[in-house]
């Protein structure tokens, strides 16, 4: 089981509502990682284990393998501020990720 403070390597496979990267361990355990981008492999630190151990939250410490959609952020405060969450992802991929989130909410919540 994961413990708060553990540092692990994760592959980001999707994006959760709210912007955290969805990462899965080989056995299927889900880790929601702040600043992880789909297609990226990251070194992350576990910050919380939730719901009786059903999933965990983490913070990205470093990129091990960059996302194919990675790009340098324009803002010099990007790493510190958090106000421009996806500035390190190509604009085209940002639009694709946002569209997917809207469609997911419409399907799950509005049953459209």
Image (cartoon, rainbow, N blue to C red):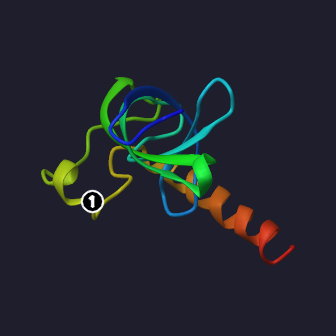
**Number of marks:** 1
Q: Please tell me how crowded label 1 is: few (under 14), some (14-19), or many (20+) other residues with Cα within 10 Å.
A: few
93 to the left or right of 47: right
On screen, 101 above or below 109?
above
Report the residue that reaches farthest toward the bottom: 110
As rendered, which of 74 and 17 lies closer to the eye?
Answer: 17
As rendered, which of 78 and 44 lies closer to the eye?
Answer: 44
Q: Residue at x 43, y 41 (%)?
A: 36
10 to the left or right of 64: right
Measuring from the top left, give residue 33's x and y in whole percent.
Answer: 45, 45
105 to the left or right of 111: left
Residue on which disc 1 sits = 82
Q: Residue at x 41, y 27 (%)?
A: 8
Q: Which residue is drawn at 13% across and 50% down?
A: 76
Measuring from the top left, give residue 94's x and y in whole percent.
Answer: 49, 52
Is residue 42 in view? yes
Report the residue that reaches farthest toward the right: 111
Q: Residue at x 81, y 78 (%)?
A: 110
Q: What element carries label 1?
A: loop
Q: Quadrant of the N terminus?
A: top right
Report the residue that reaches farthest toward the left: 76
Is residue 96 in view? no
On screen, 44 above or below 50?
above
């Amino acid at each position: 089981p994961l413990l708060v403070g553990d540092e692990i390597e994760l592959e980001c496979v999707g994006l959760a509502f709210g912007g955290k990267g969805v990462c899965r361990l080989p056995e299927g355990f889900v880790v929601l990682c702040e600043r992880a981008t789909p297609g990226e492999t990251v070194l992350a630190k576990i910050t919380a284990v939730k719901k009786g151990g059903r999933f965990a939250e983490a913070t990205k410490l470093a990129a091990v393998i960059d996302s194919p959609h990675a790009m340098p952020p324009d803002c010099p405060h990007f790493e510190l501020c958090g106000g421009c969450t996806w500035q390190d992802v190509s604009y085209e991929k940002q639009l694709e990720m946002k569209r997917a989130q809207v469609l997911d909410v419409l399907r799950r919540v509005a049953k459209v």
